[in-house]
Image (cartoon, rainbow, N blue to C red):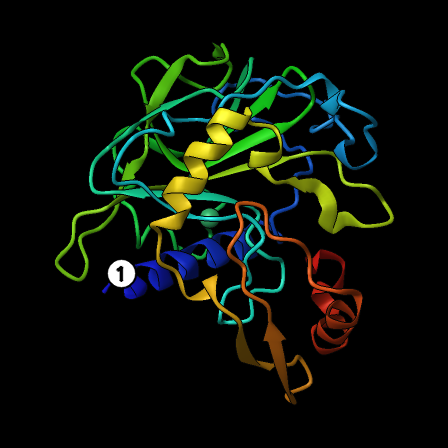
Amino acid sequence: MQTLVRGSLLIAIVAAYAACGGGGSSATSPSTSGTTTSLSWPTCDYATATGASRCGCSVVAPFDVTTAGVELWPFGVHAQSGHTEGHRGLDFNATRAIPVVSPMDGVIYNIDNTQDSSGGLAAEYLLTGNTHFTTINMDCGLQVRFIPLTLEPGIVAGTRVARGQRIGTISEMVVRFGLVRWSTHFEMDARAPASDPALNAVCPADLFSSAEVSGLQQLLAGSVYPEKVPRTVDITCENGSRLSMTFPAEDKLCNPRLDATSRSRLAACLPSRASSIW
Ligand SMILES: [Zn+2]
């Protein structure tokens, strides 16, 4: 049953990314603040940031990592369906609405559910009231997304938020399989290098404190998902042929990219998505 729930969530996330152009982060005008901007965001080129600067980002985990009963779906995993982009964030799943804080200082950029043009997430979440796809532009140049987040009253596009400030809770899902679940997808995007656009998603755990990473690793150890073990996936290519791909165990908080050979095979199979293969 747990697997079914995760599979369902995964399909929803894949649909969301397909709907917004593969998860890219090019700026658009905020749709709910009534203002427009020509700012390009994110501005932090994380992949080429040197040393410990991390673009100057000081990040806290978006929830208390000692919270019991939270399951994680980690960064970088490739879904059994052949999700080529890898998982671009962390999913937090629980049986209740756990509080969420802003991981950095920034400004709410966009609270808007229209990027779910496929309707995939609307089918998964109770997208009513104050539950929204939420994007925050962080002062250090990263862009954070919660898909979705149930916002505190008064938090709207344009609201300044502080690192550690409570901004909402993870969101209730439509009841399926006899379970009541709350969940969110948390993602941090940097400016993508032109040579490798797939590198714009940053593994959040790279920026958390060692104590938070330790807490998340404990949660991960108790989490169940199909990608935790090696597996072979049969993928339908864009030309109709089939590709059998062997994926490694993806059991870390930050799972590494596929090796170059595997990425090349996937790119040949799915040329329209080649630039986003993780
Ligand atoms: Zn996710």
The answer to which image quadrant residue 201 occupies is: top right
The C terminus, quarter of image: bottom right
Camera-side residue of 126 and 91? 91
Q: Quadrant of the N terminus?
A: bottom left
Which residue is outermost to the bottom?
A: 241
Question: How many marks on residues?
Answer: 1
Check disc 1 and report the residue beneath it.
2
Compared across the picture, whether 81 is left or right of 167 comes to right
Question: Could you tell me residue 19's position as x and y percent?
Answer: 53, 54
In the depicted structure, whether residue 200 falls above or below residue 165: below
Q: Position of residue 158 (x, y in %)?
A: 51, 14
Of residues 103 and 228, the one drawn nearer to the viewer in this rendering: 228
Q: In the rendered structure, which amino acid carries the disc numbered 1?
A: Gln
Q: Residue at x 75, y 70 (%)?
A: 267
Residue 112 seen anywhere in this rendered image of the structure: no
For the question of whether residue 55 can be seen, the reply is: yes
Q: Residue at x 71, y 78 (%)?
A: 269
